[in-house]
Amino acid sequence: MKTAPRRTVWLAALAAATITAHAQTPAPGRAAAWPASAVADPTTLGFTRAGLDALDARMKQSVADGDTAGMTIILLRHGQVADFKSFGRQTADKAMALDTMFRIYSMSKPITGVAMMQLYEQGKWQLDDQVTKYAPELAGLKALTWDKDGKVVFDADGKPVLASPKKPATMRQLMSHTAGFGYGLGGDDPVNKAFREQRVLGSSDLDEMMKKLSAIPLLYEPGTRWSYSVAVDIQGYLVQKLSGQKFGDYLKAHVTGPIGMADTAFYVTPDRNPRFADVYHWDRQQNTLVVNTPPAGRGGFEDPTRLESGGGGLVATTHDYARFCQMMLDTGEIGGTRILKPDTVKLMAQNHIGPLHVAVDGTQRQPGAEAVRFGLDFAVYVDPKSVGLPYGNGTYYWGGAAGTWFWIDPVNDLAFVGMIQNQGGNRPGGLNFRADSATLVYAALAQPAKSSAR
């Protein structure tokens, strides 16, 4: 993370922030055929100009209000870019740009999932295989026991009572956060405390991470509940082990590279650093946005030796992530380059957790949780209209800890990506970026559920 000093971001400056709409130069190769700029007439994609103007105006207003220092949004439909704008500031002294780079944190998870599914297509693993078949380091893990009031059971010596799982965790459960692992992002139970104390996510490499995990119990009995976890970091380790390539090298060679995600990586190279956005939070005492102080004890995003975290380690541009979304919309292909089979994409976007529920989006709790299930490294809306949400049935999505968000709607053949950098507190009463942007996008959709002519 950048080491700029903590400084106040004046709302007056944000209100006057510029909006840019220049095109980026796509990466070379066949994937470059996918457009890098918005169409001249979004009505050809089924959107009203007034509707998209309202979307842009609301996003710009959120910057002026101090909900975020700056953002970039991109809206895709029928294989084209309908809207691509930036608002506000990248840093205190630089305007946000379309090619600004962001910490996407947990939006790394779907990318890791695609890598895993490529290896699945090669027959290197199966969904109902035991995780320990490929990660024997995790064999013998026991799980916490919980009482009827949802509290951890401790013995007379104050140690948590552990029990052997009735059934071992499967790869399907690993891909859907039901394998029972902890994470350390929250919770005062012994498992999440151990994650933080042992700095699991601050490990020097994936092998060290797995060694630490082998000594921490499961949080829950596998298959009994959905619980956000370190599972996708374990997947990154498995990609490395099953492929025989360093995880980051595998992604570049087989996922991000082939589809033209030229800026997506586990660290920011010196030549890209001028495009790297600062992270902000709302300071309640000063009643304004301020730049975050870089966290201590973890490799910064400018450190090429930092942990290649499949669960939250990538940086990317908005257009890069839009390429990823378009690849998924096009059932595994973009710009003439296929990296997944259509059936595999469909498998990832199906409900794999049955009646269990998901209450978060990688950023915060969201409305309509009762209609959310989980696929393979994506959350899935199984019946959004039943809870008053505008998405097409089967829309899948996730988000990142610094506020980035996206969704992919196959029914309406559209996808949306929003990039901000907020972490550590938001303005009270501020915009719900996912929910409010979705309301505006679908309000602008004059021709919903029209199949693509591509």
Image (tube, grey):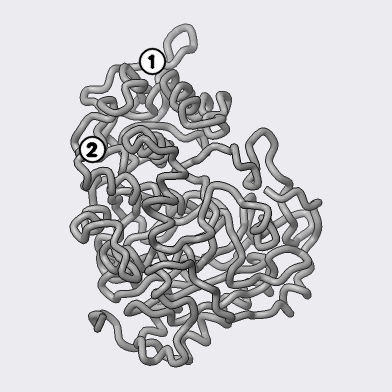
Across and down, in percent, residue 136 comes to 31, 21
Q: Which residue is mark 1?
A: 161
Q: CA distance from mark 1 to mark 2?
A: 36 Å
Q: Nearer the viewer, residue 394 or 320?
A: 320
| Screen quadrant of the C terminus | bottom left
Residue 231 visible in the snapshot = no
Q: Secondary structure at mark 2?
A: loop
Residue 72 visible in the snapshot = yes
Q: Quadrant of residue 169?
A: top left
Q: What residue sits 64% from the left and 68% below the top?
A: 70
> In the image, is 51 to the left or to the right of 134?
right
Q: Secondary structure at mark 1?
A: loop
> In the image, is 333 to the left or to the right of 444?
left
Residue type (three-letter) at the residue carrying disc 2: Lys
Q: Which residue is mark 2?
A: 124
Q: Quadrant of residue 67?
A: bottom right
Residue type (three-letter) at the residue carrying disc 1: Val
Image height of 179 relative to 2, above or below: above
